[in-house]
Amino acid sequence: MRDVDLFAQALGLDEPWRVERTEFSTETGRLDIYLGFDRGGRFSCPECGRAGCAAYDTTEKSWRHLNFFQYEAFLHAPLPRAECPECGVKQVKVAWARPGSGFTLLFEALVMAMVKQMPVLAVARLIGETDKRLWRILEHYVNEARARADFSEVRQVGMDETASKRGHHYVSFFVDLVRSRLLFGTEGRDAHALGAFRLDLLEHGGRPERIRDLCMDMSAAYQRGAALYFPRAQITFDRFHVMKLFNTAIDEVRRQEQVERPELKRTRWLWLKSAPKLTKRQTEELAALLKPSRDALMTAKAYHMKLSFADRFWELPPSLAEAFLKKWCRWAKKSGLAPMKKLAQTLWDHRAGLLRSFFSEISNGLLEAINSLVQAAKARARGYRTTKNLINMAYLISGKLDLALPT
């Protein structure tokens, strides 16, 4: 079998395309495959699909293909414009590459598989391309897959922010809590983020009035956005964010108290970690600090208040939850600890969303997991040049997108 016939079969070429010649050089480290078609070759119109259209003119084009062993491979072809009686002169589409791309479909499929597991810059260096070109590939397939996504069945949505880069730069993520997929990401963490999500939901067949539940933190901006753009949805404040508020209050108590109680210095994580995550040494240190005495630590008191809430509130029957919350808030307000008094007022002011969790049975644990994956990818890449890149990578990792890649 001649080399041109071998490569024609390997490439899966259809009429009227054929391999005309190949050039291989170990010095340049590349294989060049030149394609062509016979004079008088006929093509289908790329718009209406009409077959048998004559070539009007051609333009030489090249595409990077999968490596031939360790050597880079390129396809070259005179890309024709076809003259259609109905549509006029149109650029022909080829089976091995998408319009406007300098890569074959199979090469792009390889890139997409690699960038899901490795930083884009590392992939670019490995295959000998610029990272900007690879980001364009990723953005194309993510956008195409998201355009096909159907949000018509979305009913429960979780939302949270994550840092996009150093400083006060944030991205808001919205997830489908039923299908465990990232729906939308947008820059910022204010009410406008919910407006952007509403528009995206409509573009994908979703209905804002069908959203039953929104799970979020106690951000005033998020609450304003929910009231404005999703007025029928009920808000749930999940336990993850509630316990973050407890940890913040306890740490404030500790920092205030350590001025006079030096034994509290460098003990921050003893109070903030859950008991199962403490080492044996940390467990012993915490037990020593919690021992009752005349000069018992105020931080220990705040810690006991946290445990009394965390160990009981979420396990109560819904009918008893509000009474427990009211009793706990009274206790906190009489504790003499300013951060705990402030926390109690916050919880009571947001009691409707707290109590809603007993009925919606949703939480933002999924968002916490997605944020961890995104931040881990960002750390491996040592940051992303743009927020758009961060969001596209989040879609790729957590969007459960059907990328429709060639095989």
Image (cartoon, helix red, strand yellow):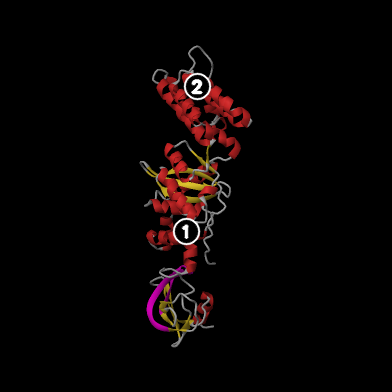
> In the picture shown, does residue 77 fall above or below 205?
below
The structure residue drawn at horizontal position 49% and vertical position 74%, both measured from the top left corner, is 95
Of pointers 1 and 2, the one earlier in the residue sequence: 1
For label 1, the residue is 142
**Residue 124 part of the magenta segment:** no
Where on the picture, by quarter, is residue 85?
Answer: bottom left
Nearer to us in this view, 304 or 217: 217
Nearer to us in this view, 131 or 87: 87
Q: What secondary structure is the stretch in magenta mostly built from?
A: strand
The structure residue drawn at horizontal position 48% and vertical position 72%, both measured from the top left corner, is 96
Q: Position of residue 164 (x, y in %)?
A: 40, 46
Q: Position of residue 118 (x, y in %)?
A: 47, 54
**Residue 76 part of the magenta segment:** yes
Q: Label 2 neighbourhood size at 10 Å, few (<14), some (14-19), many (20+)?
A: many
Instruction: Give, as a single range, the part of the protein colored magenta.
Output: 55-80
Res. 311 in view: no
For label 2, the residue is 332
Amino acid type assigned to the residue bearing label 1 in the image? Val
Quadrant in which the N terminus is drawn? bottom right
